[in-house]
Amino acid sequence: MAKVVPLAKLDSLSNESLEQLLTEAPQVSSLREAVDSVMRAIHGLPDIMGCELSQVEVYLGRAAAKPPRLRQRWEDGRFRFEEWRSTIAMVTFRTRKSLIRTEKWELTAQRFIRFLEKRRVLCCANVAAGGAGRWSDTRETAIYLVARKRRGRPTFEPTDEERKRAVGDLVDQGCFEDAEAMREASQLFMHPEERAEHEWFSPKTLPHRNGNSESFEEVPQCKVCHHPATPGNYGFCGYHRRLKR
């Protein structure tokens, strides 16, 4: 179960909270596992974003598995998506940097996405896969996604027949070095109902700026949502306290 962060609240998350996200992310050791993690994560986004899969736009990136590096990448993602209120992020998995580099996982992901785009059969509105510039000096790398809900009505999804033709072409091409991973991707592509369950990330406390000072104080989180609890509201934010009355 992946933990989702609303990027509008990124400034209120401490490095300890980001370290928790990284620690709880699954570790993978093969491209097949990586493909499975990413595609199931994308398929599960509509449930938590409250929209159709065809309305979801996704950016996939990598970052050194360190809180400051992850924070910077998510700041970049927030800027990329123009700070839309629907913008969220999660860590899909962690793995050794050497695996991604030597086995060319990024190049494979980019080829796969371009293949689906060319045939107009993406399961969601749009997917972009990019790296994060130069490689970090850390042993472990985190693969994350940033997503937002596209404005407007849902677009038409590809038909089953269009998906089958695309999958057949993908398998027949033979241009992917890891054929087993591509077969796994094809199966998941045909079955978007096979998805991961996501939940809002809920650290026990949220750091908030204490007045105008540079220090931070720990504020309990609402029992229902990811917003800070208001003093005197019995552990609820203002909105959920009103609902409890």
Image (cartoon, grey):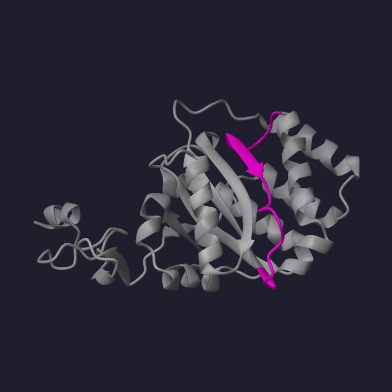
Quarter where residue 93 is shown: bottom right
Write the residue at 48% across / 52% down.
Answer: 75
Count of picture labels: 0
Q: Position of residue 240 (x, y in %)?
A: 19, 55
Q: Looking at the figure, which quarter contains the C terminus?
A: bottom left
Residue, far front: 213
What are the residue bounds of the magenta stretch? 120-140
Above-or-below relation of 204 to 185: below
Quarter where residue 172 is shown: top right
Q: Position of residue 194 (x, y in %)?
A: 60, 51
Above-or-below relation of 62 to 216: above
Q: Position of residue 5 (x, y in %)?
A: 43, 56
Q: Nearer the viewer, residue 168 or 36?
A: 36
Q: Main secondary structure of the magenta part?
A: loop
Above-or-below relation of 40 to 67: above
Can residue 44 be seen?
Answer: no
Write the residue at 16% across / 55% down.
Answer: 238
Relative placement, left or right, of 7 versus 38 is left
Q: Nearer the viewer, residue 235 or 157?
A: 235
Relative placement, left or right, of 87 versus 91 is left
Can residue 79 be seen?
Answer: yes
Write the residue at 49% across / 68% down.
Answer: 21
Above-or-below relation of 144 to 141: above
Q: Residue 135 lies in magenta, yes or no?
A: yes
Q: Position of residue 176 (x, y in %)?
A: 86, 49
Q: Residue 222 lies in magenta, yes or no?
A: no
